[in-house]
Image (tube, rainbow, N blue to C red):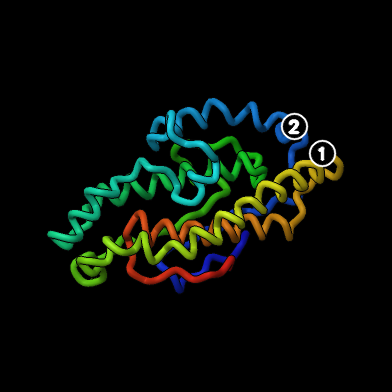
Amino acid sequence: MTEIKKDYPASLSIDYSEKSNRLTTLFRIFMIIPIFIILCFLSGQIGYASEPTDNLIIFGAGFIFIPTLLMILFRKKYPKWWFDWNLSLTKFTTRVFSYLMLLTDQYPSTDEEQAVHIEIRYPDASKELKRGMPLIKWFLAIPHVFILVFLYIGIVFVTIIAWFSIMFTGKYPERLFEFVVGVMRWSLRVSVYACLLTTDKYPAFSLK
């Protein structure tokens, strides 16, 4: 299991397995369909998502972005139940895409943590969040999004290589695994900063 760093109010780790299931890997693209349809309905992506990486970069559109922005802007509040929904959807989305990208053989659960571990700290909005920041975070995050687009293109090729590796050796190469998880970790930090709005701390340009 990758060590979870505590210096940012959001973290991601995925348990690495020394052995992958060849059979489920072979049919992964078909096995993912039922749970992916559920995710699309929950995140509002039916008829809108043109690329899988759209969901990975922003972790879906189902979180309550505009109401959260308005609540922070005018009341400096972040309702706990909104946070819980955003967190649960983020975890579920990450489990689905981790399964799709062959990082785990566990079929995505709608509620159990499984091999994917995400921590996002609930903010004290009145003390930690500035009123006007949600209005400009999307702009400040543009450099991250630009880089992440290319990194996710790299993930597509890495996943293809990993698929062949699993077919022939029964194992996902560990260095490639760490790269993919690192990109997802970076993406999570950007999502927490610019979309979930749970922190004003600018995310690091790092896979760690």
The quarter of the picture where the N terminus appears is bottom right
Give the residue drawn at x 22%, y 64%: 125
**Residue 28 % position (x, y):** 67, 32
**Residue 127 % position (x, y):** 21, 72
The residue to which callout 2 is attached is: 26
Residue at the far left: name it: 75
Q: Residues within 10 Å of mark 2 (few under 14, many from 20)?
A: some
Q: Report whether 131 appears left or right of 42.
A: left
What's under tag 2, amino acid-wise? Answer: Leu
Q: Which circle marks residue 125 in the picture? A: none
- Verify CB contact (< 8 Å) between mark 2 and mark 1: yes
Give the residue drawn at x 60%, y 56%: 150
What's under tag 1, amino acid-wise? Answer: Met
Q: Is residue 137 above or below residue 153?
A: below
Q: Is residue 175 or residue 159 the one in the foreground?
A: 159
- Label 1 sits on a secondary structure element that is helix
The quarter of the picture where the C terminus appears is bottom right
Going from the N terminus, do you reach mark 2 or mark 1 first?
Answer: 2
Q: Residues within 10 Å of mark 1 (few under 14, many from 20)?
A: some
**Residue 113 % position (x, y):** 49, 46
The residue to which callout 1 is attached is: 167
- Label 2 sits on a secondary structure element that is helix
